[in-house]
Amino acid sequence: RQLWIPPGFAHGFLVLSEFAEVQYKTTDYYVPADEKVLAWDDDTLAIAWPLAGAPALSGKDRAAPRWAGCALYD
């Protein structure tokens, strides 16, 4: 299965199974300096994540800014 996410569109996922493999196809080369991050649990987003406990997050995700601190694009 594939899901197309437009460039610059915020996206994230929650694995509900014991194991998952995620692969990305991109429209251009990966440029780490262009990568942005947004706090997954920001109240502005109001996402009802079906969590059974505390999620395992990367350091980058733990340090992600809230919506109010993110760069916005036209």
Image (cartoon, rainbow, N blue to C red):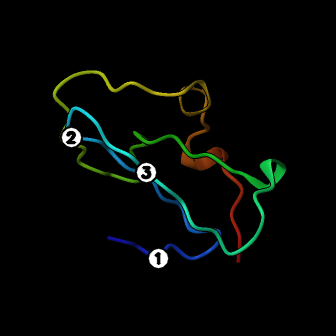
Separation (CA) of disc 2 from disc 3 = 13 Å
Vertical comparison of 14 with 60: above or below: below
Q: Earlier in the sequence, mark 1 or mark 3?
A: 1
> Residue at coordinates 38% horizontally, 46% vertically from top-left?
21
Disc 3: which residue: 22
Q: Nearer the viewer, residue 4 or 55?
A: 4
Give residue 29's mark: none
Q: Position of residue 39 (x, y in %)?
A: 51, 40
The residue type indicated by label 3 comes to Val
Please tell me in which quadrant of the rendered image residue 61 appears. Answer: top right
> Residue at coordinates 78% horizontally, 64% vertically from top-left?
29
Q: Nearer the viewer, residue 28 or 14?
A: 28
> Residue at coordinates 70% horizontally, 78% vertically from top-left?
74
Separation (CA) of disc 1 from disc 3 = 13 Å
Mark 2 or 3: the one toward you:
3
Q: Position of residue 49 (x, y in %)?
A: 25, 44
Residues marked 2 and 1 touching at CB (< 8 Å):
no
Please tell me in which quadrant of the rendered image residue 69 appears. Answer: top right
Please tell me in which quadrant of the rendered image residue 25 appears. Answer: bottom right
Q: Nearer the viewer, residue 29 or 51?
A: 29
Vertical comparison of 1 with 68: above or below: below
In the figure, is residue 67 to the left or right of 16?
right
Q: Nearer the viewer, residue 63 or 25?
A: 25
Q: Tag count in the figure?
A: 3
